[in-house]
Amino acid sequence: MKRILSMLLLVSVLIPFTHIFGIGGFGLQVGQSIFSVAESMPPTGIGNVSLTNGSFDGAYVLGGYLYVDIIPFIDIEIDANIRGNTYDINFENSLGPIDPISFAWASTDVYITLRKKVFGLSVPFLAGAKLHAGGGFNTHKTTPLADIDMVTELLGGDLANGNTDALSDNLVSYLEDHAIDATGFHIQTGLQLNVL
């Protein structure tokens, strides 16, 4: 009898702690994406002016993930990522060619999702799994790839005779001012595994 009481006491002490640890989770994402950007030579319309964007394969990815399931009827999930890579541009006008300039391509996104458990399965004191479905809001921000309009603006409007030193001097502020923003909605399904 004493042994049964001590086991019940042990179980009653452990159960609240397992619920405390089950209120959320987080994660870190590190990797490389699989898309590629091919070399391009946008037309300039001016005979002695050329622009060549170098290619790049994939982008480096760093991100994070957080979910909270303390609300009884719905869970909240937040996922954020930053991706980036560099590529060279080569530009030439009547003043001659410039040394290749390393341009940066970067992209960020944030997904906020409300999700609900559809089906759950558990093995007491060992593990559990749940299938969930939901939807939410997402935002994206991307720097533009170099094009003729960008180079024209960076050269002060004179594509044929502009001082090419201005290309690298004004690049960061141009990329910040001309970032491409997009927002949208998404739906998702997923499987979450919990191991105690």
Image (cartoon, rainbow, N blue to C red):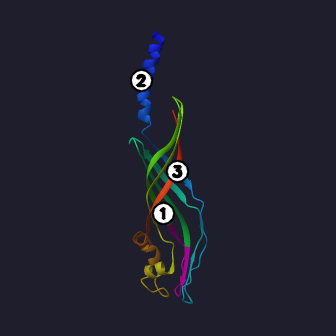
Mark 1 secondary-structure assignment: strand
Judge left or right: residue 85 versus residue 156: right
Q: In the figure, 191 relative to 164: above or below?
A: above
**Outermost residue, top side:** 1
Q: Can I make out residue 164 in this image?
A: no
Instruction: Name the amino acid, label 2.
Output: Val
Mark 3 secondary-structure assignment: strand
Q: Could you say where residue 83 lies in the image, as x and y percent from the top left?
A: 51, 60
Say whether disc 1 or disc 2 marks the residue closer to the N-terminus: 2
Whole-number angstrom distance, CA of label 2 to CA of label 3: 34 Å
Q: In the figure, 41 relative to 76: above or below?
A: below
Judge left or right: residue 91 versus residue 78: right
Q: Residues within 10 Å of mark 2 (few under 14, many from 20)?
A: few
Q: Could you say where residue 87 lies in the image, as x and y percent from the top left?
A: 55, 68
Residue located 43% across and 80% down the image: 153
Circle 3 residue: 189
Magenta region: 89-104
Circle 1 residue: 107
